[in-house]
Amino acid sequence: MNYDVSIKWDSIRNGEIAALRELFNKTNKSLLNYSYSITRDKFLAEEVVQDVFVNIWNNRELIKITGSVKAYLYQSVHNLTINKVKQLKTKHNSVGMLVSEEFWQYLEETSPINDSVIEKLEADDIEIIVRKAIERLPDQCREIFILSRDYQMSNNEIAKKLNISVSTVKTQIYRSIDKIREEFHK
């Protein structure tokens, strides 16, 4: 799901159904796989993901996402999956098909949303924002920043390679970081 959903979220909040459809199309498969990993039921997983997107559309003006949109989607799918499984347990119990409480406790303990998955998703979102900000930097500034960040070259090595002063390198790196920081405050 290497997809910048933050821009789409603003469109969805503004009532653009096409943006919701695009978000669904880009995230549906991985969300289905996640729900399926808990339920082992393809149809239930599909129902969960559809219900999450219907809920998002119906409550789009009220939903406040403070972190990653992807993390929000995964957390929503996780919570609804667990709730649907519990509902099924209640229905099964009402017709005499008892499943032990230990099983449900095991399910909740072994299927919690993995914090490292959320952190990875948020890191992917941050990387997208950083890459877009780097692309918008002036040529020399971008080149210096990439040499420093991606190639781990020292300021002295960059200065020698580009035939510029070390202070110019430092200034350009500072400007790059400042421009990238601005992207997170938009």
Image (cartoon, grey):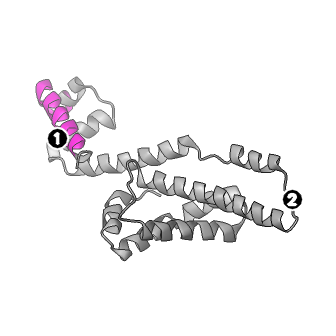
The residue where tag 2 is placed is 98
Residue located at (33% from left, 74% from top) = 16
Q: CA distance from mark 2 to mark 1?
A: 66 Å
The secondary element bearing badge 1 is classed as helix
Answer with left or right where residue 91 lies relative to residue 24. right
Position of residue 34 relative to residue 11, above or below, is: above
- The magenta-colored residue range is 160-182
Q: Nearer the viewer, residue 152 or 121?
A: 121
Magenta region's main secondary structure?
Answer: helix
Residue 184, percent across and down? 27, 45
Q: Which mark is residue 110?
A: none
Q: In the figure, is residue 176 to the left or right of 10?
A: left
Q: Which residue is mark 1?
A: 141
Q: Quadrant of residue 49?
A: bottom right
Q: Tell me the residue at 60%/59% (across/down).
A: 80
Give the percent coordinates (x, y) of residue 59.
Answer: 42, 66
- Specify the farthest residue to the bottom: 18
Amino acid type of disc 1? Cys
Residue 166 is a magenta residue? yes
Decide which of 48, 129 is in the foreground and name it: 48
Give the side of residue 6 with respect to residue 117, left or right.
left
Q: Amino acid at mark 2?
A: Leu
Please give left or right for residue 14 compared with residue 85 in the image: left
**Residue 94 within the segment the image draws in magenta:** no
Label 1: how many Cα within 10 Å (few below 14, some 14–19, many 20+): some
* Secondary structure state at the residue bearing disc 2: loop
Task: Report if residue 4 is visible in the image.
Answer: no
* Image quadrant in which you'd find residue 12: bottom left
